[in-house]
Image (tube, rainbow, N blue to C red):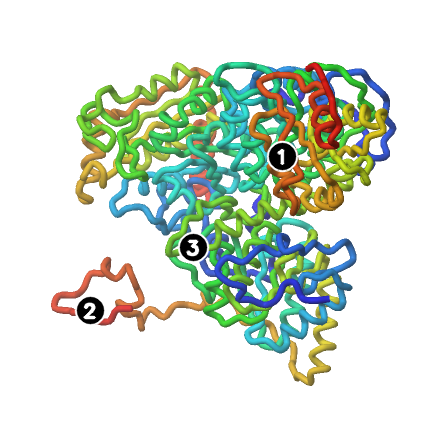
């Protein structure tokens, strides 16, 4: 891990804008999740602050949680495509690649392989964050084939069940019957079974979640990234409602997310044995370290 | 030899310097107004511009702002030595290349997607770009030539920039110091008295005085403020 | 992808100038596909991504073999061309040297990504082994696809034969990565006529390789978490809005074509210039590129034997197009004949647009859909141009 590329030249630090100095001094880079994770939001400078998403947008909320949950933000690259999400993702202090339509998983295949070539001894996390259209419609072939090839990176589908950014058109992930643009009589076929497709295509860790519980959401993100480093493709299918196109009053966005938890976005976590081994090993080590730390603190108090 | 590239504003949609026939200088040479000249000649003209035009400013880019390579620290030190010798020089950084949202603080930074805002607001008539990646430097220099009357100087570690009025290539710390010496010579010739002074720190770093905050300071976010019962917020931007 | 198990080859690293102009050469009798692969072998390529299409497949099969031998560090078969070209764009952003190749319909399928490579500053090398664009389906040679490629911003070199294919492919890597260029280079040659036919190729030593790519000597930062700025977004969406200059996309596009223009000096340096001229004083010139240039060269030889005032111009570089060079070379010419392997005559249009007296340009001869270009077809136009009566049975 090298923080050099985000350490200001000594002479120039006082000439940098405040925003950057704070990011260096109080940001999450080089810190553990205990120091700058979702549990400490508000106590460190987040990598994502201002963004142009709609008021009450659950996607913006999830993206904020996602960045706070990154196990290694200083060695992470995100990739995305056209859609609402990139409006916020592109404002974060984590490298973001915006390519063409639905190409994020193909680009990530090349990028993650290139990272392993150039930096065989470093852990560089690659995460694609695209909408339901980008992941399951226009990018379907590239998404599926990256999984089939066993590419080691994390795919996150921000599912708002509609093409929000282009003005509310039906997507493959819209629920059957939904009346949307380009579906004037209601959608005539069912929502695509994304997590089933992911499992079939070879994802080793798959989660479907409505992000109502921050800790649980962060845990899934972290697991997905850590497993992708070692084992293979991982996938998170997350509900990020579009309160504009589905006319959800801002104050009911969270309630809707809770309702969806019992409906189309019931929590599901799948992992292969190999993925489970990695998770148990890493989380076991973390627990041990925490215990040792607590013990050390107790000793300190005693002595 | 006529000047091919001159101080702007060049207009709504100007042709690029290369498409007007300007070519990068070969090793050991420099560009001045689009013509290939000796490095010293370009440095001398650039120095005069910095000494005689209003609000001279240095715009350091990411390659020199961030301590990522061995030679950065020395180059950064040399740039600051140069800055101290330019009367009333400011340093406004270009820390990265993505567009600023929701709005750039033009006193605190410059951005390649809308460099004209910083130049125009600060009435900068002479500027040095250093440590900016070549692609973004070219975009920035072209937009400044299009829409402002700023004299631009490119100090480039690679091959230089056609769009700048003066362009120095293969820049090392020693070249910056040579430029500084030439600047001091020119300053003395012009009879300008100046004690080397470091430019002021970034204005955004000043501590905010919360006691004088009013609703107007919140700009477009003022609607998010809770007004006290009976209070009428009349002061807006 | 277990890197440890990969074969390790010891090679002498040399710069492009030495490799292309000074390195010892030995003659081989190989196909165009082999020539391209042999160049890739010597180019210190980090990663190649393959997807089959006739007649290109041969090239990426051979590149696969080269990978297995250890000349390339990473190689895989992608899902289709859009996936291939997108993955190239992703990998190149990490600062590695990339190669792929395609043909006709494959090029068009990948074109959304290819057309954005220059704007994304992707210095990859793309082999284009030409083929008809389907409707109806055919796998035959026809270079109409180059017309689509000409307006993307990428450099386009057009190889006459197997030797050109080798030299241009090798030079392409060096030119693409120059800090004042840094855009993709397409090396095109005719499918089957060159890819599947053998010719003599003087190749450089196999144990000599081009200097590796230096991701820090680039006009844009590599997106590798090692290069500043940290808050990097190299190619942010730049739409006209309240927080963007109206000029940003326009100057960005200018920068791509400026980079294209700047490459000309390297085309002189490594390939001897964008055109080759024979008999500069002639009245009639045959101007051609690629495989058509081979036939035009032969027509020029016939004309020499018959004592006719005929010159020959081969266009090596389609982008940047050598406007000044062609205008100068034909300033005293009375007729220009432009033989081509496509129906629209993209080279003819370019030549016409380069000179003040476009009326002297003869539109053709053209063959397409896989037809060969007999020398006699060009000779007939030469006779017509010189006002010589002829009765050629074609």
Give the residue number, with chain letter if any, for mark 3.
C244
The part of the image, by quadrant, that contains residue C40 is: top right
B130 and A116: which one is in front? B130
Element type where label 3 sits in the image: loop
Mark 2 or mark 1, whichever is nearer to me? 1
Q: Which residue is mark 2?
A: B233
Which quadrant of the view contains residue C217?
A: top right
Q: Residues within 10 Å of mark 3 (few under 14, many from 20)?
A: many
In the foreground, C246 or C70: C246
Residue A286 visible (yes or no): yes
**Distance from Cα at disc 2 to Cα at disc 1:** 70 Å
Query: Between residues C347 and A185, which one lies in front from this camera angle?
Result: C347
Q: Is residue A26 left or right of residue B134?
A: left
Q: Residue at x 43, y 34 (%)?
A: A291
Other-residue count near label 2 (Cα within 10 Å), few / some / many at <14 / 14–19 / ≥20: few
Q: Is residue C126 above or below residue A204?
A: below
Name the residue tied to disc 1: C348
Residue at disc 1, secondary structure = helix
Q: Residues within 10 Å of mark 1 (few under 14, many from 20)?
A: many
Q: Residue at x 60, y 37 (%)?
A: C349
């Amino acid at each position: 891990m090298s923080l050099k590329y985000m350490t200001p030249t000594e002479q120039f630090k006082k000439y940098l804008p405040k925003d950057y100095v704070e990011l260096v001094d109080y940001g999450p880079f080089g810190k553990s999740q205990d120091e700058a994770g979702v549990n400490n939001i508000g106590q460190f400078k987040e990598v994502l602050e201002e963004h142009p998403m709609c008021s009450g947008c659950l996607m913006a909320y999830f993206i904020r949680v996602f960045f706070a949950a990154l196990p290694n933000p200083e060695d992470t690259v995100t990739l995305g495509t056209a859609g609402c999400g990139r409006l916020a993702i592109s404002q974060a202090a984590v490298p973001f690649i915006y390519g063409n339509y639905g190409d994020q998983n193909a680009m990530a295949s090349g990028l993650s392989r290139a990272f392993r070539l150039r930096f065989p001894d470093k852990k560089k996390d690659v995460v694609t964050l695209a909408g339901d259209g980008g992941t399951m419609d226009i990018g379907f072939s590239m998404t599926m084939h990256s999984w089939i090839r066993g590419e080691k990176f994390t795919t996150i589908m921000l599912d708002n069940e509609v093409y929000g950014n282009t003005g509310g058109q039906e997507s493959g992930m819209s629920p059957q019957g939904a009346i949307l643009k380009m579906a004037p009589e209601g959608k005539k076929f069912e929502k695509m079974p994304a997590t089933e497709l992911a499992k079939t295509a070879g994802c080793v860790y798959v989660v479907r979640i409505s992000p109502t519980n921050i800790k649980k959401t962060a845990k899934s993100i972290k697991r997905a990234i850590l497993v992708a480093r070692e084992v293979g493709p991982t996938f998170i299918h997350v509900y990020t409602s579009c309160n504009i196109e589905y006319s959800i009053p801002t104050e009911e966005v969270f309630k809707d997310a809770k309702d969806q938890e019992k409906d189309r976005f019931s929590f599901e976590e799948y992992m292969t044995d190999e993925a489970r081994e990695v998770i148990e090993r890493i989380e076991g080590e973390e627990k041990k370290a925490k215990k040792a730390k607590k013990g050390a603190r107790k000793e300190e108090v005693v002595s | 030899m006529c000047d091919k590239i001159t101080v702007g504003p060049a207009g709504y949609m100007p042709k690029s310097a290369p498409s007007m026939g300007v070519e990068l200088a070969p090793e050991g040479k420099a560009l001045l107004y689009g013509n290939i000249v000796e490095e010293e000649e370009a440095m001398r003209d650039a120095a005069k511009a910095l000494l005689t035009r209003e609000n001279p400013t240095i715009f350091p880019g990411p390659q020199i702002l961030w301590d990522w390579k061995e030679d950065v620290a020395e180059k950064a030190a040399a740039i600051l030595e140069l800055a101290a010798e330019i009367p009333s020089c400011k340093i406004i950084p270009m820390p990265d290349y993505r567009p600023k949202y929701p709005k750039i603080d033009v006193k605190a930074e410059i951005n390649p997607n809308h460099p004209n805002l910083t130049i125009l607001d600060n009435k900068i008539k002479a500027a040095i770009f250093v440590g900016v990646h070549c692609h973004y430097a070219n975009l920035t220099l072209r937009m400044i030539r299009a829409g402002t009357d700023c004299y631009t100087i490119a100090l480039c570690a690679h091959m230089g920039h056609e769009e700048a009025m003066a362009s120095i290539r293969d820049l090392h710390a020693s070249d910056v110091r040579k430029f500084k010496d030439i600047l001091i010579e020119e300053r003395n010739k012009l009879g300008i008295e100046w004690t080397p002074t470091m430019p002021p720190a970034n204005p955004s770093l000043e501590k905010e005085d919360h006691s004088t905050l009013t609703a107007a300071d919140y700009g477009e976010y003022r609607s998010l403020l809770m007004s006290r019962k009976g209070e009428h917020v009349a002061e807006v931007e | 992808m277990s890197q440890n198990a990969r074969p390790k080859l010891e090679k002498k690293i040399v710069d492009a100038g030495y490799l292309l102009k000074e390195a010892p050469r030995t003659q081989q009798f190989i196909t165009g596909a082999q020539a391209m692969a042999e160049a890739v072998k010597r180019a210190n390529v980090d990663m190649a991504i393959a997807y089959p299409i006739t007649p290109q497949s041969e090239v990426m099969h051979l590149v696969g073999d080269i990978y297995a031998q250890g000349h390339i560090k990473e190689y895989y078969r992608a899902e289709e061309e859009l996936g291939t070209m997108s993955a190239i764009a992703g990998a190149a952003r990490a600062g590695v040297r990339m190669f792929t190749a395609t043909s006709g319909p494959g090029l068009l399928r990948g074109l959304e990504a290819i057309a954005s490579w220059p704007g994304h500053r992707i210095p990859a090398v793309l082999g284009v082994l030409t083929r008809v664009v389907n409707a109806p389906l055919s796998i035959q040679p026809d270079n109409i696809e180059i017309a689509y490629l000409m307006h993307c911003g990428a450099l386009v070199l057009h190889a006459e034969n197997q030797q050109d294919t080798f030299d241009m492919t090798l030079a392409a890597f060096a030119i693409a990565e120059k800090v004042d260029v840094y855009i993709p280079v397409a090396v095109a040659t005719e499918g089957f006529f060159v890819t599947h036919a053998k010719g003599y190729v003087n190749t450089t030593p196999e144990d000599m390789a081009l200097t590796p790519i230096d991701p820090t000597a680039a006009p844009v930062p590599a997106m590798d978490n090692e290069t500043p700025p940290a808050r990097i977004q190299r190619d942010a969406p730049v739409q006209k809005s309240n927080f963007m200059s109206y000029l940003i996309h326009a100057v960005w596009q200018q920068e791509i074509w400026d980079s294209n223009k700047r490459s000309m000096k390297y085309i002189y340096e490594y390939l001897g210039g964008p055109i080759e001229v024979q008999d500069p004083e002639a009245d009639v010139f045959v101007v051609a590129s690629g495989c058509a240039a081979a036939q035009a060269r032969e027509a020029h030889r016939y004309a020499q034997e018959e004592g006719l005032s005929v010159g020959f111009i081969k266009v090596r570089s389609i982008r940047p197009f050598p406007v000044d060079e062609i205008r100068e070379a034909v300033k005293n010419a009375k007729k220009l004949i432009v033989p081509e392997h496509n129906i629209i005559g993209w080279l003819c249009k370019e030549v016409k647009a380069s000179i003040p007296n476009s009326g002297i340009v003869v539109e053709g001869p053209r063959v397409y859909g896989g037809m060969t270009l007999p020398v006699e077809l060009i000779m007939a136009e030469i006779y017509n141009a010189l006002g010589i009566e002829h009765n050629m049975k074609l």
